[in-house]
Image (spheres, grey):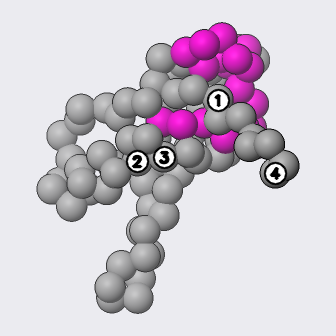
Amino acid sequence: MMDTKDRDGNSIVVGSHVQVLSVPALDFEPDEAERVQSMLGDVLEVYEIDLYGQAWVEKWWHLDSGESTSHSLALRSDEMVLSKPKAGS
């Protein structure tokens, strides 16, 4: 398994909380593109490290219809930074 690091060289493991520094510029539907862009700057929990060393995070949205939707991102080292716990947390 690869040793996954953030942009500053901090080790990232499943359960780490990382801040999303950039999101891919892929061809999304307008609603989906807006949701994906809203992940920028969020602190999300890593739920998987893939074979390529990318950290996977997911965000959920609750829609007006009462339904929920989510989107996952695979982050490279330069696209995330470890979020350190605040003092007293």
Q: Which of marks 4 and 3 is in front?
A: 4
Amino acid type assigned to the residue bearing label 4 in the image: Ser
- Whether the residues at callouts 2 and 3 have beta carbons within 8 Å, the answer is yes
Does label 4 or label 2 sit earlier along the sequence?
Answer: 2
**Rendered image: mark on residue 42:** 3
Whole-number angstrom distance, CA of label 1 to CA of label 4? 16 Å
**Residue pointed to by mark 2:** 39
Residue found at x 60% / y 19%: 6
The secondary structure type at the circle numbered 4 is loop
Query: Can you name the residue that lies furthest to the front here?
Result: 87
Residue receiving disc 4: 89
Q: How far apart are marks 2 and 1 (CA)?
A: 15 Å
In the rendered image, the vertical position of residue 12 relative to residue 30, given as above or below: above
Does the magenta portion include 76? no
Q: Give the range drawn in magenta.
A: 2-20
Query: Magenta stretch: dominant SS?
Result: loop
Task: Give the residue number, with chain letter if any, for mark 1.
Answer: 82
| Of the pair 13 and 28, the residue shown nearer to us | 13
Q: First in sequence: mark 4 or mark 3?
A: 3
Distance in Å between CA atoms under marks 4 and 3: 18 Å
